[in-house]
Image (cartoon, grey):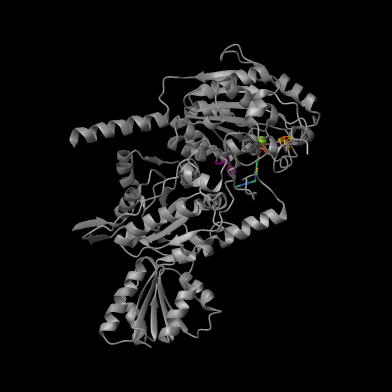
Amino acid sequence: MVKKPLPYTYTEEKWIRDRYLPHQWCPGCGIGTILKAVIDAMDDLGWEPEDVAFVSGIGCTGRSSGYVNAHTFHTIHGRAIPVATGIKLSHPELHVVTMLGDGDGIAIGGNHFIHAAKRNIGITAIIVDNSIYGMTGGQVSPTTPENMKSTTSIYGALEPPMDPISLALGAGATFVARAATWNPVHMRQIVKKALEHDGFAVVDIKSQCPTYFGRYNGISDPVELLNWYKEHTYIMKDPSDIREGKLPLGIFRDNKSKVELSKKYRQLFEHLRKEGENNG
Amino acid sequence: MELVFGNHAAAKGAIDAGLKFYAGYPITPSSEIAEELSVELPKVGGIFIQMEDEIGSINACIGAAYADKVSLTATSGPGFALMQEGLGLASMAELPVVIIDVMRGGPSTGLATLVGEGDLLMAIWGTHGDHPVIVVSPGNVKEFYIYTQKALVWAETHRIPVVVLADEVIGHSYQWIDEWPEPIKIPERTKERVLEIFENPDDYLPFATDEEGHIVPLPPIDSGIKWHMTGSAHDVDGFPTIMPEKVKRLIERLWNKVGDIRDELIDYEYLGDGDADILLMSFASMGMSAKQAYLELKEEGYKVALFRPRVLWPFPGDELAEIIKKNGIKKIIIPELNAGQLMLLTKAFLADKGVNVQYVGINHQYGEMISPDEIKEAVYNG
Ligand SMILES: Cc1ncc(C[n+]2csc(CCOP(=O)(O)OP(=O)(O)O)c2C)c(N)n1
Ligand code: SF4
Ligand SMILES: [Mg+2]
């Protein structure tokens, strides 16, 4: 058996469990590009695999945790965030990273997503936003653009898409950004800032699913699909830089003033301990 | 002497056992467990968090169980229904969580403030697939303390979810307690225990078994050992597989898991002189009503016995059959606050035991206890 199917860099050797390769993603899929940005950024930050808990739900994106050399948990559909919440609160010293599908994170897991934002718990939420349910065969997702096709919106999606950025901002997330797989350098910079952030950090990453989203919308060639995303997104100069019919990429909020939740618990413990000493 | 509220006894049991994590969502008649733990847990450096719903609660508990040790949530029927998928994940990933279900009348919102005992079969079979779970059922306030602790210790020791089936009457009654039993403590995870089985930490396999065939212990997360877990069918390394022989090995082991530790778990109260004709049997608070009926009937000279299982899964079928044979019991009377869930289990487990008894069910499903008098009536009527 070939032990290393790919020419490895140092980062990949350290962060990827090569015994589980080859991975399950289709040729041309964006998930691998995103996972690479995440592990590169973790490495840029000088993290060690022992310091990281990497949690995912169910979906094509959900498979990512198995490949990462860290404390990993492939949970159930939509529940990566509450599981990560339990991990972060009981071991605040861990860097807790989640990779969520758009269905996983925003549809079935939407309630957990907004409440994690509200709590400002120290979890990084990387949304692999491919506007489709990849794993289950290409059904419409909360971020499928209006009129675009899928196996359950063959006449074109009737509903307008949800914007994970506005959702995260409205729910109180303290770091909110968008990136896209067509610009991996920009993506890696953004992901690094999100990982560094001490609080709930959301990065919505526009990612290509050539197999379903592409195929049902006449753009099944991965390069063509990447170009489609490139045409429909732009790197904003600042949040006032709004362009009609296109999605801005960049950082929408980076608020360092709110205390992260697991730290608040430790402050409470300390306070109660002192109070106990004074009374006893 | 201390006058103790049922739900507070459960909270105290958990704290005394060393609980460090609770996540829950308020629901009558369980909320006082959360309220009490929200006060007490932070004092001992433990996490109390009120989640957005019961799905979030069970999954936060699963996260804490992965990273630290056994965790606790408490709920009632509607919330327990929402927790079923998470319970399946805990069974499959073999992570220790304890769910206290303070039962109320159902279905649906049902009788939010009144007693019911209709969650027995849901506790055993509520999540999909053949999965292992332990179900315990205290009968009064003091037992609520004891069995919450046992649940926490068993869950952590055997890496399995445990359901504590109490009910509104237990949760909301006061009982005089002269002395608390010596608490039993949740065992801590240690690297040493793991290294007794795996010499090299890099060889750790989270779903391997030890020499006796029991699931290996989990390492502390800060021990440098890393592992993967999933709710998908998996191999011993925790990585998903659909290879039939590997899946077969996993599912058979999971399904037999509770049976393999049966001797340690089986627990019931049996009262009788060995010559009874009639056996009274029930669980949760109805177990105590049956006990009162037994005591009074005995006084009146009736040949009766009492069987009150405090562990319902694994089901004490063998033990029950033996009691029936030893006494020569001819009739089993089961008073329960549902349409006959304990009756169904009892009949199923006695079916191949060569006993020939008549079954009588007394069933209330409208929020009122079955009084000892009503049970006695069934005995008087022959
Ligand atoms: C409770 C539950 N409902 C439905 C499913 C089926 N399911 C698995 S993955 C998935 C959606 C996947 O889409 P997404 O979350 O966007 O991830 P992707 O595959 O696109 O990465 C669904 C509906 C499930 N596993 N569990
Ligand atoms: S189905 Fe789509 S999202 Fe899933 S692996 Fe294939 S390309 Fe990627
Ligand atoms: Mg998707």
Q: Nearer the viewer, residue B53 or B189?
A: B189
Is residue B69 at least partly visible in the picture? yes
Query: In screen coordinates, is B370 left or right of B238?
Result: left
Q: Quadrant of the C terminus of chain A?
A: top left
Q: Quadrant of the N terminus of chain A?
A: top right
- Main secondary-structure element of the magenta-colored stretch: loop
Q: Is residue B262 above or below residue A127?
A: below
Q: Nearer the viewer, residue A251 or B162?
A: B162
Residue for point 35% across, 54% down = B184
Q: Is residue B5 above or below residue B121?
A: above
Within the magenta stretch, is there residue A34? no
Q: Nearer the viewer, residue B39 or B77?
A: B39
Residue for point 78% across, 36% down = A2
Quadrant housing residue B238: top right
Q: Is residue A193 above or below residue A147?
A: above
Residue for point 65% across, 39% down = A63
Residue B86 percent location from the top left of the image: 53, 49
Residue A248 percent location from the top left of the image: 62, 19
Quarter of the displayed picture in which ligand 2 can be seen = top right
Query: In screen coordinates, is B4 left or right of A214?
Result: left
Q: Is residue B334 above or below residue B285?
A: below
Residue A198 percent location from the top left of the image: 47, 24
Quadrant housing residue A220: top right
Q: How many marks?
A: 0
Q: Which residues are magenta?
A: A73-79
Within the magenta stretch, is there residue A75? yes
Is residue B100 at least partly visible in the picture? no
Residue A233 percent location from the top left of the image: 68, 20
